[in-house]
Image: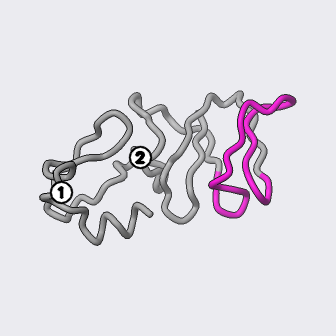
Amino acid sequence: MKTLINKTTKVAHYLWEDSQTIRMEEDMIHVGVPLIDFSIQFLNSSTGEIIENVTDPGDFWGGKYKYVDGQWVNNHPVDDGITYKWVDRGWTWEGRDDGTVPATAEWKATHK
């Protein structure tokens, strides 16, 4: 498998089979050759990185994990006193939806 991460945050946004062709360009990333299946505009050859030969964590969803030093790491703060859980397509915590527990400064700093 191969994954596309943000070079700065290490957040993994996509996971593909090794056979998938990815073309990194200055302004975007194209997936598929010769026909382009889709283009990714929020990352490019300067801000994104393809890491090959990764294992499938089994429950991958774009943004759920970071890929750091050859390992999948949950993409949420672990020391801010909040218990996070993955629901559908994003991290949540008790009190988030009703506004009684706002995101911490640490969360905001790592989830721009």
Foreground of the two, 65 or 95: 95
Please state the horizontal and vertical placement of residue 96, each as a whole percent of the image: 20, 52
35, above or below 68, in the image: above
Q: Residue at x 47, y 31 (%)?
A: 56
Per the rendering, the mark at residue 5 is: none
Q: Which residue is mark 1?
A: 99
Given this view, does label 2 or label 1 mark the residue nearer the observer?
A: 1
Is residue 31 on the magenta stretch?
Answer: yes
Q: Which residue is mark 2?
A: 65
Element at badge 2? Answer: strand
Element at badge 1? Answer: loop
Residue 42, image quadrant: bottom right
Residue 107, image quadrant: bottom left
Q: Are marks 2 and 1 in contact (CB under 8 Å)?
A: no
Is residue 87 on the magenta stretch?
Answer: no
Q: Residue at x 56, y 36 (%)?
A: 15
Q: Residue at x 46, y 55 (%)?
A: 68
Q: Is 23 displayed left or right of 101 in the figure? A: right
Q: Is 41 displayed left or right of 76 in the figure? A: right
23, above or below 103, in the image: above
Three-letter code, disc 1 = Gly
Q: Residue at x 30, y 46 (%)?
A: 91
Q: CA distance from mark 2 to mark 1?
A: 25 Å
Please state the horizontal and vertical placement of residue 94, each as a whole percent of the image: 14, 48
Estimate how packed mark 2 is, as few (under 14), some (14 to 19) or many (20 or more) residues with alpha carbons within 10 Å.
many
Q: Quadrant of the C terminus?
A: bottom left
Indicate the colouring scheme: one colour
Please state the horizontal and vertical placement of residue 109, each as a whole percent of the image: 38, 70
**For the image shown, how many numbered marks are present on the structure?**
2
Stretch of the chain drawn in magenta: 25-49
